[in-house]
Image: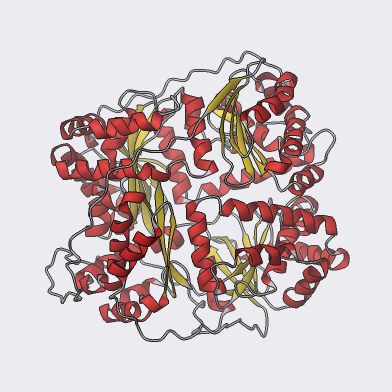
């Protein structure tokens, strides 16, 4: 009951090649969406004035700070682009550009770019889903038909970069704690005949236990916990990118030597037919998964039209992949890798230049002054502009139709003889099955002095069985084009499985083997611990990781297990041995309380019958899950500061322990939060801090929880010098929200929250999420309908009462991660007393 409108044009802002607009709407809103998209294409640019541009510059600058400048290794892509491509090449700069580029852009620059590229003769429009084709064509003609074509768009010429020598560069990264090596070779454009063989080659070289790069770097030399090599093909050129996050203190020359050794192994041994077919099977499954939703179909149609010149390229695309031969693999290796020049970047922790590749030159990266000039603008300034003429009044919005009833999938349920509960949805659109097995416990069953055991159990269940080495198990799974992945969360241990329906029985047999015959391999255990240790070290300098870890300590209190990182800490990790994992498994790997949620192209009888054997083999033990007391909500707000010297942004998190998911107010409070901070561009927080002030790229608030109390939380990142003003604005918005929420706000809230459900259960992932909520929280099969009724019935007065109760800014925890030397002292102006310094990354 929904349609998806997709537009795509070359040379846009979301990639080096194109801008994409994709909107999913209920069937009754298709006309409105076409009206809006046509407005963007033909009439929008005249409304862009100097004040509007000035504000948007600040928004994009904050996007750059958040995505690049204020995170570990954020400048890697910039250094590669500058050095792989010649000056003036469209890919020689990143899409977002530099702060200087952003600042120097004029209004005329923006309009010239728009009028050149955002024109009908450079746009592909796709409408996919449940709609009437004849009516859709009428609307397209009405709203798009009078938009004038732009100048002729020349054919895009392929511009493959040519390196005459290898380049080595290094950068001492203020946010890095581990050395990081990247190597990039020139690749091929998208849909180039060699792109398919390169996709398979890069997968074979790096992905999995048998991959030459993994074998040498991870298993033999133990210089890193993982390695990635991928082929990235774009419209006019491509890249072959290898990246390695080395272990702490490892010289990147040792990593480079290990890479060379792995490449030599491939040159000597090549790829087997068996491995080639294994990779193809996985690629075929992924291909069909991408097409399992309306979103995937519409995106792929547009992509094929623009870059392959044929929206029906689908059959040829998959066939070209499946036709790749061993000879193709060996040929592209020789042509693109063997003895070829590359760009290598060494990003190392501050003060550890000696870890960079020998003969590396310093990379030129412009660093922003965090206390730079404060730029002012008045977005409310009235600037006269001439409207683009139209044959009808485009300010009149097409009406919405009646809100459709949300189509809730049919759910079946069965409890097996030994207690395993099974919930299922039959879905025959694509020949795939997906299911999750959820086992109660997870981190809740960790011992407080050995937090991290549950996480390691989840990892180790993926590492072989009694009769299969890790490499043999991985190969068996991939030969089926399947995925089986155990993991441990805060409240459960789970396994996620997906495969082709025809391979379900063989996949289930492998799952049973993994469940009941774990290998407990000492080498894999040591490697897993080393990986976790290095991840924990890196988190110490990542502003977003720090904010998340510290926030949950403050929310849950030091006595609650959830105040810990799921992976534990350096000290607890060091104390864990393999016997701890075996003890956890023997005590807590129980069928009691376990649930299996199934979605796919098999009927209930087949699924239930197939699971009887698994259930019979599985011991059912009584498990006592500890009940921890969540810290009380503060009666008065308090500010905490974590010092990250010279941070380009302050990461802000605000909240308090609130309620569990089955609290009578939980969903109603989420409805209340839509206009506050849950509604994207419709939210007050976004409207003020992004749209009016340009202080942030994004800000959101939410209520989260399970059967255990979860927090209300509000999070954003702002330029360092805007920290206090941003917090003052947030404080004011929260204070005013109960009295300013209006009937218009309510109308917007109801319209969105009901209409968004039109394709809520379209994909297998969405259906599994629905089953997870039903099975975890005891919700009825039609819970979505009951939630919609809450939305329909809620009043302005109820919203205002909920806001007064749940978003009082004077009773919250305020956490700021940033530069204490310049920002901490002034925070007392908020009226909550001086900020408390809780830690520092110095």
**On screen, residue 716 above or below 781:** below
Q: Is residue 554 left or right of residue 616?
A: left
Q: Is residue 165 left or right of residue 300?
A: right
Q: Position of residue 462 (x, y in %)?
A: 71, 38
User: Is 314 drawn above or below residue 711 in the view shown?
Assistant: below
Image side of residue 420 versus residue 103, left or right = right
Question: Which residue is rendered at x = 51% and y = 57% of the image?
Answer: 297
Vertical comparison of 285 with 462: above or below: below
Q: Is residue 246 visible?
A: yes
Residue 721 location, quadrant = bottom left
What residue sits 48% from the left and 73% below the top?
17
Q: Position of residue 124 (x, y in %)?
A: 43, 70
The coloring applied to the image is secondary structure
Give x and y (percent) for residue 623: 60, 15
Task: Between residue 365 and residue 512, name the one nearer to us.
Answer: 512
Q: Is residue 560 visible?
A: no
- Identify the residue at image location x=37%, y=76%: 120
Q: Position of residue 827 (x, y in %)?
A: 25, 46
Left or right relative to 62: residue 773? right
Extreme right residue here?
268
User: Residue 673 occupies which quadrant of the picture?
Assistant: top left
Residue found 35% across the figure and 28% down from its top = 786
């Amino acid at each position: 009951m929904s349609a998806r409108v997709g537009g795509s044009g070359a040379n846009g802002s979301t990639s080096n090649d194109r801008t994409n607009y994709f909107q999913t709407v209920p069937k009754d809103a298709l006309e409105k969406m076409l009206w809006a998209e046509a407005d963007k294409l033909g009439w929008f640019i005249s409304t862009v004035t100097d004040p509007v541009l000035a504000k948007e510059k600040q928004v994009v600058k904050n996007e750059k700070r958040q995505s690049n400048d204020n995170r570990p290794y954020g400048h890697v892509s910039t250094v590669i682009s500058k050095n792989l491509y010649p000056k003036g090449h469209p890919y020689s700069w990143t899409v977002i550009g530099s702060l200087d580029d952003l600042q120097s852009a004029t209004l005329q620059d923006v309009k010239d770019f728009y009028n050149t590229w955002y024109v009908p003769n450079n746009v592909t429009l796709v409408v996919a889903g449940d709609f009437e084709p004849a009516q859709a064509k009428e609307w397209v003609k009405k709203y798009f038909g009078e938009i004038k074509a732009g100048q002729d768009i020349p054919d895009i010429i392929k511009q493959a970069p040519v390196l005459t020598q290898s380049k080595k560069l290094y950068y001492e990264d203020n946010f890095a704690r581990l050395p990081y090596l990247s190597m990039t070779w020139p690749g091929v454009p998208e849909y180039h005949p060699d792109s398919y063989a390169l996709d398979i080659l890069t997968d074979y070289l790096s992905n999995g236990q048998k991959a030459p790069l993994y074998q040498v770097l991870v298993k033999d030399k133990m210089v890193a916990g993982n390695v990635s090599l991928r082929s990235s093909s774009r419209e006019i050129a491509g890249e072959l990118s290898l990246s390695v996050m080395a272990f702490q203190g490892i010289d990147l020359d040792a990593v480079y030597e290990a890479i060379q050794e792995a490449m030599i192994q491939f040159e000597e041994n090549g790829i087997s037919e068996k491995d080639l077919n294994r990779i193809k099977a996985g690629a075929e499954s992924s291909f069909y998964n991408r097409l399992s939703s309306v979103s995937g179909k519409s995106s792929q149609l547009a992509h094929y039209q623009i870059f392959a010149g044929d929206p029906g390229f689908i059959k040829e695309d998959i066939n070209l992949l499946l036709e790749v031969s061993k000879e193709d693999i060996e040929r592209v290796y020789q042509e693109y890798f063997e003895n070829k020049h590359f760009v290598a970047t060494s990003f190392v922790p501050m003060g550890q230049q000696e870890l960079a590749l020998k003969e590396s030159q310093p990379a030129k990266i412009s660093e922003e002054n965090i206390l730079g000039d404060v730029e002012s603008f008045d977005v409310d300034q009235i600037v006269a502009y001439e409207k683009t003429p139209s044959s009808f009044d485009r300010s009149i919005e097409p009406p919405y139709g009646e809100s459709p009833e949300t189509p809730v999938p049919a759910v079946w349920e069965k409890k097996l003889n030994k207690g395993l509960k099974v919930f299922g949805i039959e879905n025959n659109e694509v020949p795939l099955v997906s299911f999750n097995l959820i086992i109660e416990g997870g981190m809740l069953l960790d011992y407080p002095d050995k937090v991290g055991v549950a996480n390691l159990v989840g990892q180790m269940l993926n590492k072989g069985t009694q009769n299969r080495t890790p490499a043999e198990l991985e190969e068996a799974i991939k030969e089926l084009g399947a995925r089986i992945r155990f993991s441990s969360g805060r409240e459960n241990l789970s396994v996620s499985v997906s495969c082709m329906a025809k391979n379900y029985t063989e996949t289930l047999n492998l799952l049973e083997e993994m469940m009941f015959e774990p290998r407990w391999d000492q080498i894999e255990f040591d490697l897993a611990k080393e990986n976790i240790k290095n991840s924990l070290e890196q988190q110490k300098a990542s502003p977003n990781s720090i904010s998340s870890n510290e926030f949950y300590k403050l929310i849950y209190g030091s006595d609650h297990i959830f105040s810990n990182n799921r992976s534990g800490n350096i000290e607890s990790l060091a104390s864990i041995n393999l016997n701890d994992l075996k003890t956890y498994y023997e005590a807590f790997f129980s069928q009691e309380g376990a649930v299996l949620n199934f979605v796919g192209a098999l009927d209930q009888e087949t699924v239930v019958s197939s699971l009887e054997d698994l259930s019979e083999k599985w011991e059912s033990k009584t498990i006592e899950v500890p009940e921890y007391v969540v810290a009380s909500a503060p009666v008065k707000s308090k500010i905490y500061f974590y010092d990250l010297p010279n941070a380009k942004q302050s990461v802000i998190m605000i909240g308090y322990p609130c309620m569990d998911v089955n609290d009578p107010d939980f969903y109603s409070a989420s409805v209340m939060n839509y206009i506050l901070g849950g509604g994207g561009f419709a939210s007050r927080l976004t409207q003020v801090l992004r749209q009016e002030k340009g202080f942030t790229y994004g800000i959101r608030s939410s209520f989260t929880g399970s059967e255990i109390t979860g927090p209300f939380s509000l999070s954003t990142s702002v330029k360092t010098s805007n920290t206090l003003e941003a917090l003052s604005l947030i404080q004011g918005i929260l204070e005013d929200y109960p009295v300013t929420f209006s009937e218009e706000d309510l109308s917007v809230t109801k319209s969105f929250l009901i209409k968004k459900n039109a394709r809520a259960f379209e994909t297998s992932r969405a259906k599994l999420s629905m089953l997870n909520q039903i099975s975890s929280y005891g919700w009825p099969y039609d819970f979505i309908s009951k939630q919609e009724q809450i939305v329909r019935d809620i009043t302005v007065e109820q919203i205002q009462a909920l806001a007064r109760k749940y978003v009082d800014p004077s009773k919250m925890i305020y956490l700021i991660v940033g530069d204490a030397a310049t920002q901490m002292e002034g925070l007392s102006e908020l009226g909550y007393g001086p900020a408390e310094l809780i830690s520092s990354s110095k």
